[in-house]
Image (cartoon, rainbow, N blue to C red):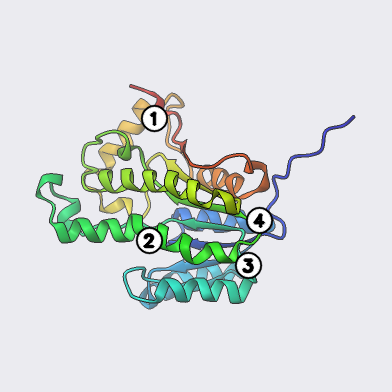
Amino acid sequence: MTPPLLPFSLAGKKGLILGLANEHSIAWGCAQMAQQQGAEVVVSCLNEKALPFVAPLTTSVGIDLKPCDVERPGELQALVDHAVARLGRLDFVVHSIAWAPLEDLHGQVINSSSTGFARAMEVSCHSFATLAKLCAPHMPDGGSLLTMTYLGADEAVPHYGLMGPVKAALESLVRYMSLELGPQRIRVHAVSPGPIMTRAASGIPSFDELLNGAIRKAPLGRLVTLEEIAQLCTFLCTDASSGMTGQTIYVDAGCHAMA
């Protein structure tokens, strides 16, 4: 008997992707890959000021774009409402946003301000929980919730600073969300890419050193590409990953496995 083909397609799936900043954004890689695999998506950027810079990307491929600043009351709700009105339901959601005040990001963790720490936690971590709360009622058939993390959540990486503890909290949040949302057949994962030059990463001090260190450490001897990250995210949004949840999954050329 010939075994059935695995469902690696996103044909007919509906998704919401947060965090488009430019053509190098993980959100953009995910949006393009999802669309190529048959999904219909809505994508968000930070605010109205960002629209003229990113709209040419989405307009060129017919993807719906809406601004959303998660720190502004009501905007996350408005984004989800817009996506549901446009798509009818949600099958997957990709949370690819992270931020910390530069003065706190560039300093030592012990010198970080409580206000800066709280804002970094709200934007980069707690917004994922809020997003899940808003999206879950619109995922009647279950689906996938993804967020982006980094090795600095598990190891103390020089210059990563404040974002390390924030990402560690995010990875823990993923596990608890998977426990709570499992009965609704909603799967939750953190994707942990190796360092790539995104706008968010450009704010990390000595980022070139981090990139070069990753190349030296990686068994594959290189950085990963935006396409490779998007491929993993796409797989996690398909029915082929239906038996997986609660994990931090690395796509970093093997860095995480090396001492």
- What amino acid is labelled 1 in the image? His
Nearer to us of marks 1 and 2 is 2
Task: Assign a secondary structure to mark 4.
Answer: helix
Asked which secondary structure carries label 1, the reply is helix
Look at the numbered discs 2 and 4 and tell me whether their residues touch, using CB distance below 8 Å. no
Vertical arrangement, residue 217 with respect to residue 102, above or below: above
Q: CA distance from mark 1 to mark 3?
A: 36 Å
Q: Is residue 20 visible?
A: no
Q: Quadrant of residue 208?
A: top left
Instruction: Judge the density around disc 3: few (<14), some (14-19), many (≥20) Cα neighbours within 10 Å.
Output: many
Residue at horizontal 50%, vertical 56%?
94
Residue at horizontal 61 percent and vertical 67 percent from the top: 61
Circle nearer the N terminus (3, 2) = 3
Instruction: Using the numbered discs, state the Cα–Cα distance from disc 4 to disc 3 in whole angstroms.
Output: 19 Å
Q: Position of residue 8 (x, y in %)?
A: 69, 45
Name which residue type carries label 3. Answer: Arg
Disc number for residue 89: 3
User: Can you give x and y, in whole percent of width and height, for residue 178 in the image?
Assistant: 49, 47
